[in-house]
Amino acid sequence: MKKKILNTIWVMGVLALVGFCLSACNHELDIQQAYSFTVETMPVQKHIVKGQTAEIRCTLKREGNFADTHYTIRYFQPDGKGRLKMDNGTVFKANDRYPLMKEEFRLYYTSASTDQQTIDVYVEDNFGQRAKLSFEFNSQRDEEKEKPNEDKK
């Protein structure tokens, strides 16, 4: 009889422990969807003349991969005038969003100005995260202003 009582207590204790452990579990999977990312570029030329095109090589670096993550790209030009084009031929309109379909891509900026030019490129995901790249180009005219006058001695 004593053995039966001890077995019953032991079984009740094990059941209580199992019940406690199972009640503490969350049966939903915790799936991360939004992963941080950056956009890396190769060095870009600093000087450009009107009509010249600068190539910007870009790589999207993600910390993780969620299949339903979508990226867009857009740009804004606060200084100067020019045209930005994607390697697939898409010519960007300022502040319009375009789908970014690959992780390695090239942008081509063509100067339409003799003044200093700045472009800001934004890559965003569908979770609201954003990476910003800024590029400044000095025109040939600006370079001439920076050179000291060697004729005066």
Image: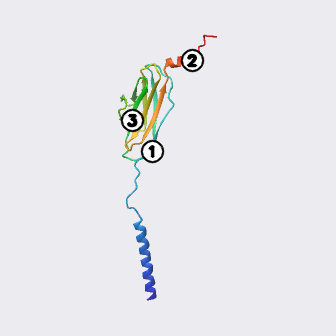
For the residues bearing labels 1 and 2, Cβ distance under 8 angstroms? no
Q: Position of residue 98 (x, y in %)?
A: 35, 34
* Residue matched to label 1: 36
Q: CA distance from mark 3 to mark 2?
A: 37 Å
Q: Earlier in the sequence, mark 1 or mark 3?
A: 1
Is 147 positioned to the left or the right of 86 in the image? right
Residue drawn at 40 percent across, 55 percent down: 30
Nearer to us: label 1 or label 2: 2
Q: Earlier in the sequence, mark 3 or mark 2?
A: 3
Residue drawn at 42 percent across, 65 percent down: 24
* Other residues around mark 3 within 10 Å, as few (<14) / some (14–19) / many (≥20): many
Label annotation for residue 20: none
Is residue 77 visible in this depiction of the protein? yes
In the depicted view, which residue is nearer to us: 108 or 113? Answer: 113
Which residue is farthest bottom?
A: 1
Label annotation for residue 73: 3
Label annotation for residue 147: 2
Q: Position of residue 44 (x, y in %)?
A: 50, 29
Figure check: 124 above or below 118: below
Query: What kind of element bears circle 1?
Result: loop
Figure check: 25 above or below 136: below
Figure quadrant of the N terminus: bottom left
For the residues bearing labels 1 and 3, Cβ distance under 8 angstroms? no
